[in-house]
């Protein structure tokens, strides 16, 4: 559920009880999975971006994201030997899954997870199923590096375009091929990019003038007159046109983003900030991190 400053009563036009007050500050809830042997930078890089993003770059009280960590155990040790403490376990995560707007999946240690068919595989599937059952809410599934192998294994990427770490491309393609035969589904179009976005957000109107329909890259800056960022994200959960259009899309309009390795995850998370908060917020975070934000690609498609 979207958490906002201020309270309103839920109604058919406002099913998620979103405050319509002009000064309301939306808090975007992110659930990040942790698993043994994960790559620490796949977790820390995106976390740093999300923790720095603000709706108002000059007001520290307007933090845009709230992150929650989930793991099978209280402490999770990364490939690098760093230990991270989870906020909740998977049992609680399944119960609270409808609350979250973004599910973020770090990579690393993928072979053991796939062999054991362990979490976060089940949670990924549940998040995707939730969107198909309830497309009224805008949700994003973001995988970092080899986290995309988990999405592929669950059939999430069938018919979509996706990327992963360059060293894992062959394995990734094999999984995608096997899954397409298993599910009698379209194959995933595997590409080598910084990040790949499927089901991008767009504002209703002329696609040729729309800043969220970007066919080659997302490098073009949105026009100053367009709905964008937190305002568009907040409205997309209440507008009937948005709900109807999402329901007709693959995966119920679930936005699926896969990234390459290491710093590509930072780039992909900056993209998320740009579309859900603002371009200004993303640029400010990149500047603070002294990171050269390199853009990925947005696949032809529509999302609201």
Image (cartoon, helix red, strand yellow):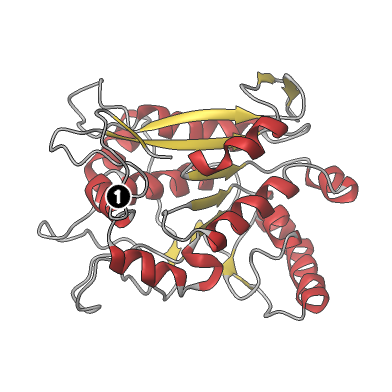
Q: Nearer the viewer, residue 275 or 121?
A: 121
Q: Nearer the viewer, residue 217 or 206?
A: 206
Q: What residue lies at 83% left-to-right and 50% top-to-bottom?
A: 114
Residue 29 x %, y % = 45, 36
Q: Is residue 88 left or right of residue 100?
A: right
Which picture quadrant has residue 61?
Answer: top left
Q: Is residue 139 left or right of residue 150?
A: left
Residue 74 x %, y % = 73, 19
Disc 1 target residue: 14
Residue 163 x %, y % = 60, 61
Which picture quadrant has residue 303?
Answer: bottom left
Q: What residue lies at 26% left-to-right and 49% top-to-bottom?
A: 229
Residue most extreme to the right? 115
Q: What residue lies at 32% left-to-right and 54% top-to-bottom?
A: 12
- Image quarter hosting the C terminus: bottom left
Residue 293 in view: no
Residue 256 x %, y % = 52, 59
Which picture quadrant has residue 59?
Answer: top left
Q: From the viewer's perspective, is residue 137 above or below residue 34?
A: below
- Image quarter hosting the N terminus: top left
Badge 1 crowding class, 10 Å Cα cut-off, few under 14, some 14 to 19, many 20 or more, is some
């Amino acid at each position: 559920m979207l958490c906002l400053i201020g309270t309103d009563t839920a109604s058919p036009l406002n099913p998620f009880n979103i405050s319509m007050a002009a000064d309301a500050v939306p808090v975007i809830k992110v659930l990040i999975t942790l698993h043994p042997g994960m790559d620490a930078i796949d977790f820390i890089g995106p976390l740093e971006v999300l923790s720095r993003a603000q709706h108002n770059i000059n007001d520290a009280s307007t933090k845009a994201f709230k992150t929650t960590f989930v793991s099978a155990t209280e402490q999770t040790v990364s490939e690098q030997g760093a230990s991270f403490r989870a906020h909740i376990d998977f049992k609680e995560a399944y119960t609270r899954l409808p609350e979250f707007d973004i599910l973020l999946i770090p990579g690393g240690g993928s072979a053991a997870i796939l062999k054991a068919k362990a979490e976060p595989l089940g949670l990924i599937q549940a998040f995707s199923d939730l969107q198909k059952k309830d497309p009224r809410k805008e949700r994003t599934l973001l995988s970092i590096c080899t986290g995309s192998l988990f999405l592929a294994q669950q059939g999430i990427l069938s018919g979509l375009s996706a990327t992963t770490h360059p060293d894992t491309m062959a394995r990734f393609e094999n999984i995608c091929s096997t899954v397409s035969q298993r599910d009698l589904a379209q194959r995933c179009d595997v590409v080598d990019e910084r990040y790949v976005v499927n089901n991008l957000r767009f504002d209703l109107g002329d696609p040729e003038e729309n800043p969220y329909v970007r066919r080659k890259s997302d490098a073009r800056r949105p026009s100053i007159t367009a709905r964008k960022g937190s305002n568009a994200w907040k409205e997309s959960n209440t507008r009937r046109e948005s709900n109807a259009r999402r329901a007709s899309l693959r995966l119920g309009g679930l936005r699926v983003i896969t990234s390459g390795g290491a710093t590509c995850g930072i780039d992909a998370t900056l993209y998320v900030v740009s579309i859900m908060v603002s371009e200004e917020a993303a640029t400010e975070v990149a500047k603070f991190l002294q990171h050269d934000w390199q853009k990925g690609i947005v696949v032809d498609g529509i999302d609201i």
